[in-house]
Image (cartoon, grey):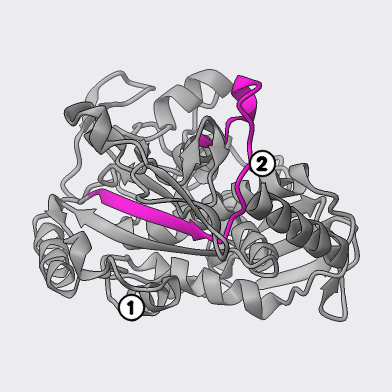
Amino acid sequence: MRFITAGESHGPQLTAIIEGLPAQMELTADMINKELKRRQGGHGRGRRMQIEKDRVEISSGVRHGKTIGSPVTLTVVNDDWKHWTGIMGIEPLAEDMNPEDVKRQITRPRPGHADLVGGMKYGHRDLRNVLERSSARETTMRVAIGAVAKQFLRQLGIETVAHVTEIGGIETDPSTYANLTIEDLRQTVEEDPVYCADKEASAKMTEAIDDIKKRGDTLGGVVEVIIEGCPPGIGSYVQFDRKMDGKLAGAMMSINAFKGVEIGLGFEMARIPGSEVHDEISWDSERGYYRKSNRLGGLEGGMTTGMPIVVRGVMKPIPTLYKPLESVDIDTKEPFTATIERSDPCAVPAASVVAEHVIATEMAKAIMNEFRSDTMDGLQKDIEQYRQYVKEF
């Protein structure tokens, strides 16, 4: 499975092409639209989420609600495009028009964004050429692709969920949701304004977001993704680039504004002895092999263990501030306060949705690499046989 995304933040549409999906997999636009709606939700989202109501169109690779094995094309139309046609138009400028007269050109790079370095790399004097593609708007298609991946995983008995565990230094108490099933955790999160499973922490987070908005500042946080039902042995120890830890960490770090990742106990392992880190192995006739704990987050030696996979990512505060930081105009070299694009005081809840979907995508890719995946029913049979094999090993 491989994919590519295309499109600018204020361009006419966003597009993704996915190749390698098995034939006969159930897939509809509604399955994807549900996830796109979640990405646009969460307390702390800004005005752009009211302007854009993202809905996907499937234009290839699906017939009568099932994949047919050919590339799947997904498109999300930007409703705001009508206001940007003169600024982001595809066609060349009229002969009598000076390029410098195009509205909303940007020569003042924003700290924390790709603006300045991207302009240097690609030779753009109008930094809008950079920010339009480097914008987190691109994650719309990452979620759309991930929604397809989640549907794929679900048909193999693998479920995913994501939730917010920290915003602005306010942390959840894991004991409040430790005993929830993945279905109950998902329902709890989807009903919460900041996609948090701890109600007390959620209320404090919501208050903190409202307070930071009044001050013209932003907040970051931590999100956690859990995958249940994945068989052991996905990934490999034999080569560095086949290790599942690296693939999942890379996927998490590919999300806009993410600056840290950990698996299982993560950085806590640096502060405790090995006896409190590693998971003892047990076996019974019903479950087969399992771990008595899951402190390593479902991964050992670059491979899945069959235990729930637990990956967390750190999102920095959004750098676009309503009390802008200082920058330098690339034309005049004079200091200025950075330009302001539409911004959210906190996008951590939405980022948890993005994180779930990029992790689901990476897991789906890994499973397709491990098993014959031309048809969905063939893959399901192979997975079931493999589960029985590892249970009796």
Q: Is residue 347 magenta?
A: no
Q: Is residue 10 visible?
A: no
Q: Is residue 275 visible?
A: yes
Q: Is residue 120 left or right of residue 332?
A: right
Q: Is residue 228 magenta?
A: yes
| Label 1: how many Cα within 10 Å (few below 14, some 14–19, many 20+) | some
Mark 1 is on which residue type?
Thr
According to the image, label 2 marks what residue?
96
* Helix, strand or loop for disc 1: helix
Q: Position of residue 20 (x, y in %)?
A: 82, 50
The residue depicted at 46 percent of the width and 55 percent of the height is: 308
According to the image, label 1 marks what residue?
188
Q: Position of residue 93 (x, y in %)?
A: 68, 43
Along the viewing direction, whichever of 179 and 39 lies nearer the viewer: 179
* Helix, strand or loop for disc 2: loop
The residue depicted at 69 percent of the width and 65 percent of the height is: 156
Q: Which residues are magenta?
A: 220-245
Whole-number angstrom distance, CA of label 1 to CA of label 2? 58 Å
The residue depicted at 71 percent of the width and 40 percent of the height is: 95
Q: Is residue 158 left or right of residue 252?
A: right
Residue 371 in the image: above or below residue 243: below
Residue 223 in the image: above or below residue 301: below
Residue 264's disc is none
Q: Position of residue 122 (x, y in %)?
A: 58, 23
Along the viewing direction, whichever of 170 and 335 lies nearer the viewer: 170
Along the viewing direction, whichever of 18 and 337 lies nearer the viewer: 18
